[in-house]
Image (cartoon, rainbow, N blue to C red):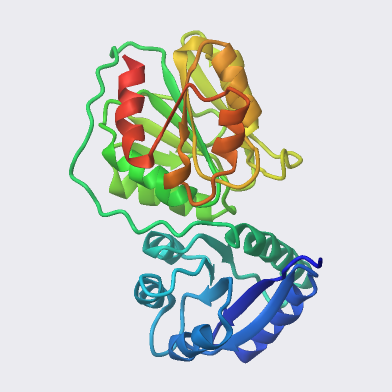
Amino acid sequence: MAKKKIRVLIVDDSIVFREILARGIASDPEIEVVGMAADPFEARDKILEVEPDVMTCDVQMPKMNGIEFICKLLPQYPIPVIVISTVSDAVFDAMNAGAVEFVGKPDMKAAQRVETFLNELKIKIKVASVARIIPSMKDTTEKVESQHAENSEKIIAIGASTGGTEAVCNIMKRLPANMPGIVIVQHIPPVFSRMFAERLNNQTKLKVKEARTGDYLEQGVALVAPGDQHVRIKKIANRYRIECFAGEKVNGHCPSVDVLFESVAKEAGKNALGVILTGMGYDGAKGLLQMRRKGARTIGQDQDSCVVYGMPKVAHDIGAVERQTSLMNIPQLICTMLK
């Protein structure tokens, strides 16, 4: 029996871009473009007509922008949405509204960038087709308290992929300002990683910035891996120094969660706490297992709260996860485990 193709609806106000998308993604034998729409109102009718498995959606459109469309659409039609956007932090608003993934629009004059973009989009369509639509989490004023020692050498390492920008944001919003140093690997394109760090910095009590070689993990500070570089830590005296470097993809990703977690296992051992969040694939599972074997505490996000229960599942199945819990419970569990 032939494998069922993933049915995709393309929503974009540019007819030229719609045609480029349609030709590009339909070249994949696992994907079928079942419809195209120029604006959200046309898209709404197309959804009823063609019943897509996945929808790609531009952010800037006439009559109604993509974010407003997603907010109104998903409660009625819970379809996995991939946002396609120029470089803008509006993609994070779209993710907050319920989109499962995003891809940056390429320079259409650069053929190689267009090809790279289309290949990335095809991969994300396949991921989105198995993603769960998680209702947007309401902001909560409930914070948790950390009781770790002020002079502690402890550090926190977090890894995430699909659905991770919102998962990380929800955790960070609830953590107090006196947390040990945090380093985050989120699978995200370059430039967007800086915007993600700035967004976290503005929405949390912690100081958050994109990591650079030479940075040190410090109390109350969180560092986000650049979108096109691996990140590892190196212990110097009683401090942990960040090293960012370009390299081949590991487990299909740069930055890779495994690269970070393996360095944390080696350099921090029992002084570390590792958290693996929603995402497709297995990046981070082996590194988290190394951390646990070296005495680190480890947490995995549970299936019900994951957009894609891939990375946490693999980590759990191989014994890397000490405690598995919902996204809402992770902040308190982090603080409890730091004691």
Q: Is residue 200 visible?
A: yes
Count up the numbered dots: 0
**How far across and down, in percent of the image, does residue 55 sit?**
55, 74
User: Between 49 and 11, which is closer to the camera in this rendering?
Assistant: 49
Image quadrant holding the N terminus, namely bottom right
Which quarter of the picture shows residue 138? bottom left
User: Between 288 and 118, which is closer to the camera in this rendering?
Assistant: 288
Q: Is 60 placed above or below 318 here?
A: below
Residue depicted at 24% across the width and 17% down the height: 147
Q: Is 99 placed above or below 205 here?
A: below
**How far across and down, in percent of the image, does residue 157 sit?**
49, 28
Residue depicted at 37% across the width and 64% down the height: 97
Q: Is residue 263 visible?
A: no
Image quadrant holding the C terminus, namely top left
**How far across and down, in percent of the image, does residue 101 sit?**
53, 60
Residue 248 left/right relative to 266: right
Residue depicted at 69% across the width and 61% down the height: 120
Pick out the residue farthest to the front. 1
User: Between 5 and 156, which is closer to the camera in this rendering?
Assistant: 5
Residue 151 left/right relative to 123: left
Residue 142 left/right relative to 263: left
Which quarter of the picture shows residue 320? top right
Pick out the residue farthest to the left. 141
Which quarter of the picture shows residue 289? top right
**How far across and down, in percent of the image, does residue 130 sit?**
59, 57
User: Between 33 and 206, which is closer to the camera in this rendering?
Assistant: 33
Q: Is 265 placed above or below 137 here?
A: above
